[in-house]
Image (cartoon, rainbow, N blue to C red):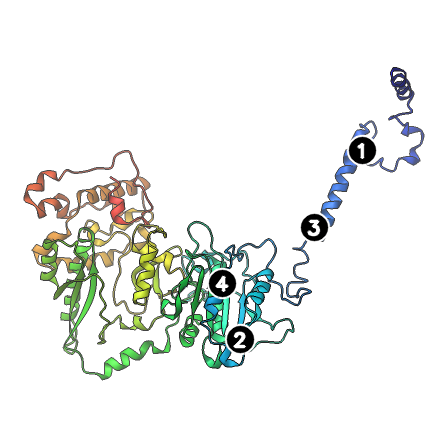
Amino acid sequence: MVKTNRFINSLSKRGYIGSYHYEKDAKYRPFSALLPEGSNPKMLYVKLVLIILMCGSFVSLLNSPSIHHNDDHHTESSAGVPRVSYEPDDTRYVSDVTVDWPKISKAMQLVAGAEHGGGARVALLNFDDGEVQQWRTALPQTAAAVARLERAGSNVTWEHLYPEWIDEEELYHAPTCPDLPEPAVDADGDGEEVAVFDVVAVKLPCRRGGGWSKDVARLHLQLAAARLAATRGRGGAAAHVLVVSASRCFPIPNLFRCRDEVAPRDGDVWLYRPDADALRRDLALPVGSCRLAMPFSALAAPHVAAASAPPPRREAYATILHSEELYACGALVAAQSIRMASASGAPSEPERDMVALVDETISARHRGALEAAVVEVRTRRLPRRRPAGGRAPMLPLFAMPEVSATANHGTLFNSGVMVVEACGCRLRLLMDHIADIDSYNGGDQGYLNEVFSWRAVLAAEPAVALAVHFVGMKPWFCFRDYDCNWNSPQLRQFASDEAHARWWRAHDAMPAALQGFCLLDERQKALLRWDAAEARAANFSDGHWRVPIADPRRNICATAAGDGEAAAACVEREIENRRVEGNRVTTSYAKLIDNF
């Protein structure tokens, strides 16, 4: 072994191994451009390896499925079953719920398809190839066809469907919505168009965690299923809609309504028989708040009927009060405003008052104040009375689609004035999911935004203002000198000195005894002073922070007004060396002032 090593070393030193003399034979240097004179020969091999790897990666890219996706996007497999039309790496539409075939078979027994001369005809939407074959094996009596749906662009987000602002008056351009492709259906293998179906079955994704209801793919699939049901049903009626989704992720409640359920939900399976006319009206709406919802032709009917009838002797507005600490003052001033508007109307105008529905938490003291301000106070757990007609200015809202509301901020709507259908099963849905759906602000608005994520938008600035809903800090939470929303960066978009002053005119018209229910809590006074100091430090250009506060309520203790012995508890509070926690738009007022 020693001799062998010496022999190899000898050859190496003489130049026979690993040291070929290139300078003697330049014509045999094909890679001389890659290996400059005097460089290390080992670099040649490193560069060659890198070139080979780069070429291999380029060839692999050319032959990847994503490059050839458009070539076979609408082709069929060799077995004659249409392919599911989505890119292999597009997981937005993929549903990981396990299909419960016995439950689907049980639901399909409720669909009367045999009376039409055979088994039920079914359109399958968002089922993969294996599930399509399983459907045909588990339910051989049905005639199943695959519905194809081109995916929405990956750049389409929920914020595109529900933008923070649109040009309602079309001053610059007409608002537009992103395109969500419509479904198409071929017959089983032969490519012929299928005219009608008894059932449209759709399988929905359900994102883990929160926000599953605000998912573009999930909305797209449900709208596509509804469109198939509305346009491919028998005899002008809508087809049944069978929804397969994780039980916690229920279908859109204002598209597939609980009143249309053929049977109660069974595990992960829902079965609906929608009303064809209602479904077509819903599908005529914009896909989101990216465009204004046009009112239906029936919108003007209530006004025509009311104009031809004799004016009623009395009309009443109804309100619900469940928080005396926060909203009793607002209810009292609303009643005063209604009476002032009624008194200033024409002689033919009916007399208007207000009815307040309260719960058991309202104290006797506040109940007495309400009874002095409004015509009637009723204690109710669930009001069920329907509107009695008349010429109420807000009556047109009853002809608007569900859910209609004005925008609040971002993708959220304001639940202060909204159109929603009242029914027992809808109430059960809302109650059943309170524990598992988080509200962004801990109140009803946050919860309703999660449940009713698909909605129509009403004009924020109609031609005639019939009512004003205050967003942000309510007028009675501010000093009367100016709208305190000016002093908050997040709330100043809602500020209006004119609306603020109008509210205070109605307040001043109330009896002095009722004005005592609009005093400021010491925590709120501290918050107002803190906001003004922050606005002063930021030097807000509107300059409201410069206005001296003359509101007499700043020196009156709200606790003492209710209980003379509690005056000693009125201690002025300040916020020192700390921030007010929480988003000022999305955090409820009650949570905000409880932070200090």
- Above or below, 54 relative to 331: above
Mark 1 is on which residue type? Leu
- The answer to which of 392 and 213 lies nearer the viewer is 213
Residue named by callout 3: 61
Work out whether residue 337 or residue 170 is closer to the camera in this orientation and state it. 337
Task: Identify the element where label 4 is drawn.
Answer: helix
Query: In what element is the residue under mark 3?
Result: helix
Q: Nearer the viewer, mark 1 or mark 4?
A: 4
Residue linked to disc 4: 102
Residue on which disc 1 sits = 44
Give, as a three-letter code, the residue at label 3. Answer: Leu
| Left or right relative to 394: residue 165 | right
Mark 2 / mark 1, whichever is N-terminal: 1
Secondary structure state at the residue bearing disc 1:
helix
Between residue 203 and residue 112, name the one nearer to us: 112
**SS label for mark 2:** loop
